[in-house]
Image (cartoon, rainbow, N blue to C red):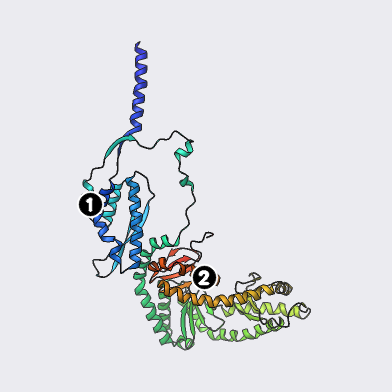
Amino acid sequence: MNACAYFRRRNILFGAVQNYKGFCHVTRRKLTSAQVTTALRPFYFLVHPDLFAQYPRAQHINDSSLKQLNSHLDQLVDLKKPQPLDLQFYIKNTEYRGSMKTVSLKLDKKSAKAAVQSVLSEFNLPTKYVDKLEERVKRGPDRDISWEGSAFRNTFSYEDFNAPRKKKLYPWLIKNMGDAEKRLAQSEPIRKDIVRLSKALQESLQLSSLTWERGLGTTHLRGCLQGLTALAKHHPSIRELLRDRHVHFGNETGVSLKGCIVLSNSEVRDQWLKNIVRAPDHDAVIQRIPHMQKAISNSLNDIQVTHRKYQPFHLAQNYIKHLERFVTSLGDYRSRNGFPKSWPDSLAHLQLVVEAASGPLMISPTGQILVPSSCPPVLLINFITDHMKEAEEKILGYERIRDREKSLYALCKEELGLAFLDKDDSVLPEMMIECMERMLASAYRLSPLLSGARLWITQYYSVMLDGEVCVPWNWDREDE
């Protein structure tokens, strides 16, 4: 063999050895399951569910979180790569006897040893034992090798391309109720302040009642109450104007159809003052409304003219404008035309709601006929003719489900142990009924988590800053 051939073969062999060394390297193996259990023994003594038998929510959350933690660690011990986890645990508060606190735990380490060290450190427990443990060493490839199939399948996991999983109620509650309870406790002084301020205002101003918009945050509401208190202090003259009045904190400023003074929660006190001072002028406008409603009713075979359900604080100054426009166009039509022969002698069983000019002509879910003030009368007449039966059926259906909804409210609060239960305006009665019926069917699982909670039924999942919990009405449904 000549020198050139020798060196050529040597270089080929040397390159193969180098490639093999790069492919087969030292990998540090994880701890054993027994070592993990021993290392976490102090942690188990802190969070074990049996220690929280008197606190059902803490017991459920710790039980679920422990199962997820153990599964995560098992995967690390088996050299798998689990997804990062965010867990919560309840522990007893050593500073205040008889109370508890929550600890959030993030699991994103790549080895069992690092994960155990992270858990112990988060709970201020010693890591001396786990620090001394030696990880087993083994030489081998840094990944499992498969020579079958396409390069795509061996490079990517199909899970990487899956759509995000839809949230499920029970796991979501397990993950978030600890945080909700903490926020609820932190906002409790504000709630007490709200009760105190509300009572003081009703007494000092001699109000008939004092209410506020659904979903108005506690901090914002307290600010509104403090603002009205300060306004009354600096302008004593408004006391006489507000006597025996209903005051409501809403989204607009004005006077409602029933004479309630509505104060926008986003406006300054000067705007509130102007609205209160003009309240007597609005009273004169409100007195005209029944006469205009009667005129429309007489023109449409005694149909009931009312306002939308679930909107009791509709402003009078806006409503009167819609009525004026509609009365004029309807009067012109009636002077030249009659009603269809298919109409009954009276439409007193139907309800008509006159709305803004840009609104839709439609039947509401409660059976009311919604008509924009700009709607030509001929279109309304034809619409009533075509949808009269539908409106009747929806009105009767609404009356049935309204009573069912009220009875379920009381039952749901009692069975789930809720401190508060309400719904967003976008949740219709039939939606709320379905939601509460399914909650009652799952009460054995949900009640330990929801006991003492303030629950809103909405279209989404959320924990509010004041600790109130929002869940969608169609939770866990397949078509969610």
Give the structural element (helix, strand or loop) at label 1.
Answer: loop
Task: Specify the amino acid type for callout 2.
Answer: Met
Question: Horizontal and vertical percent for residue 117?
Answer: 27, 51
Task: Choose top left, top right, bottom left or bottom right for residue 234.
Answer: bottom left
Which image quadrant: the N terminus? top left
Question: Horizontal and vertical percent for residue 75?
Answer: 35, 47
Q: Are marks 1 and 2 in contact (CB under 8 Å)?
A: no
Which residue is farthest top? 2
Between marks 1 and 2, how big is the CA–CA gap? Answer: 50 Å
Q: Residue at x 41, y 60 (%)?
A: 171
Give the structural element (helix, strand or loop) at label 2.
Answer: helix
Which one is in front in this view, the residue at disc 1 or the one at disc 2? 2
Q: Earlier in the sequence, mark 1 or mark 2?
A: 1
**Quick check: 91 left or right of 179?**
left
Front-most of 95 and 71? 71
Residue on which the image places disc 1: 127
Q: Is residue 124 visible?
A: no
Task: Choose top left, top right, bottom left or bottom right for residue 50.
Answer: bottom left
Q: Residue at x 34, y 14 (%)?
A: 6
Front-most of 191 and 385? 385
Q: Residue at x 47, y 36 (%)?
A: 151
Q: Is residue 37 visible?
A: yes
Task: Specify the amino acid type for callout 1.
Answer: Thr
Residue on which the image places disc 2: 432
**Quick check: 129 left or right of 196?**
left
**Quick check: 342 left or right of 371?**
right
Question: Horizontal and vertical percent for residue 370?
Answer: 64, 73
